[in-house]
Image: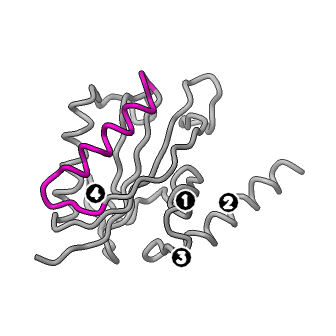
Amino acid sequence: MVETAAVVAFGANVGDRQQTILRAADELAATPGISGLRLSPLMESVALTPDGPSTEEPGYINAVALLQTTLTARELLEAGWAIENRHGRTRGAQWAPRTLDIDVIAYGNLILAEPDLVIPHPQAHLRTFVLQPWCELDPDAYLPGVGRVADLLARLYSNLSLGASS
């Protein structure tokens, strides 16, 4: 079977966020068809809401994993959903606090748009909490159809500093 490189992001802002992410990464690494999972350092980020970043909501712990898989992109997504469910994830409002969120960010060079699976993840290029840990794991990473991860991250940080000075 052919292995494909994939990027998966983890986030949690309810419960023991750090332990949840670490356990979820271990569970994903133990999933048949997944090998070589490397987890980024954990980072904290402010919660995002429909109105933008919010310090009123509990903050997130985030991480990114690079892995090799013989699973299809859909099977990888479903493996993530199963792990979320085991950790008490309930699906309600899109921006609601959650025990665990696992997103497929990239899957090889695949570009895909289905109702419940878009690859690369449509918001990845706008999220420092995805790009920063990804870049720490792979400084030469590339987000298919979008650009080099380090360049995307630099652009976000530049926009943040410009916004702060205006």
Mark 3 or mark 1, which is nearer to you?
A: 3
- First reached walking from the N terminus: tag 1 or tag 4: 4
Question: Residue 21 placed where, x, y %?
Answer: 39, 38
Residue indicated by mark 4: 117
Give the residue drawn at x 31%, y 71%.
Answer: 5
Mark 1 or mark 4, which is nearer to you?
A: 1
- First reached walking from the N terminus: tag 3 or tag 1: 1
Q: Are marks 1 and 2 in contact (CB under 8 Å)?
A: yes
SS assignment at label 4: strand
Residue indicated by mark 3: 140
SS assignment at label 3: loop
The image quarter in which residue 66 lies: bottom left
- First reached walking from the N terminus: tag 1 or tag 2: 1
As drawn, the label of residue 39 is none
The amino acid type found where label 1 is placed reads Leu
Split into 4 quadrants, where in the image is the N terminus?
Answer: bottom left
**What residue range appears in magenta?**
14-36
Cα distance in 3D space between marks 3 and 1: 12 Å
Give the residue drawn at x 41%, y 53%.
Answer: 39
Q: Is residue 115 left or right of residue 140?
A: left
The amino acid type found where label 4 is placed reads Leu
Residue indicated by mark 2: 156
**Residue 72 in magenta?**
no
Q: Are marks 3 and 1 in contact (CB under 8 Å)?
A: no
Mark 1 or mark 2, which is nearer to you?
A: 1
